[in-house]
Amino acid sequence: MAIEIERKFLVNGDAWRAGVAGRMQLRQGYLANNERVSVRVRVAGRSAWLSVKSMVPGRSRAEFEYPVPREDADAMLDALCARPFVEKWRHLVPFAGRRWEVDEFLGDNAGLVLAELEIESEDAPFERPPWLGPEVTEDVRFYNFSLATRPWQTFRGEFGDVA
């Protein structure tokens, strides 16, 4: 079992774009989504994964990922996954020796931009890029499985001009 430890933040403005070192488009759908676990299919380019994540809110969660053939992933997305899918551009943005993932959401979540940082421990120090907004790590509304059923547009007004 792997433990994923990450911090998640809203993003202010577009200054992060100047540091983008790469990007990929992701599309994911959910095979199962309940109070204990989410099971998703994710595709990026020619690659695909099946991910199983615990639904414990917070910085640390159990996660299992398995590569699957792209054709199988497409078939699962088409035939088995609930709609809508979560679609986004994932931008890789190095900053102060760390690799930030800045997700620019599409479709029903268009307008949402989140920055994620995977860290080695819950209290690991890191330098905050100037474009980071408020932390939303423990706000379940910003978990991808939540965005699949309750998109950003339904609660964006609660955040004013941020993001």
Image (cartoon, grey):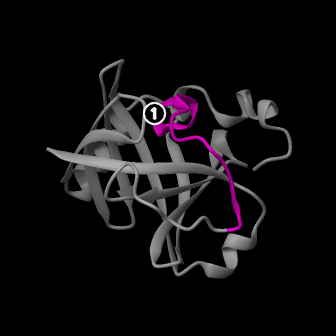
Residue 98: x and y, percent? 45, 73
Q: Single out the residue that lies furthest toward the left.
A: 1
Quarter of the image with the N terminus is top left
What residue is rendered at 70% in x and 67% in y? 130
What residue is rendered at 40% in x and 58% in y? 124
Circle 1 packing at 10 Å, graded few (<14), some (14-19), many (20+), is: many
Residue 156: x and y, percent? 75, 35
Q: Is residue 160 magenta?
A: no
Q: Single out the residue that lies furthest toward the right.
A: 161
Amino acid carrying label 1: it is Phe
From the viewer's perspective, tell me whether residue 49 is left or right of residue 105: left
Residue 49: x and y, percent? 27, 52
Compared to residue 103, the image places residue 2 above or below, namely above
Image quadrant of residue 149? Answer: top right
What residue is rendered at 73% in x and 49% in y? 111
Q: Single out the residue that lies furthest toward the top.
A: 35
Secondary structure beneath dot 1 equals helix
Image quadrant of residue 131? Answer: bottom right
> What range is drawn magenta here?
130-146
Residue 41: x and y, percent? 32, 44
**Residue corresponding to mark 1:** 145
What residue is rendered at 48% in x and 50% in y? 7
Q: Nearer the viewer, residue 114 or 131?
A: 131
Compared to residue 133, the image places residue 79 above or below, namely above
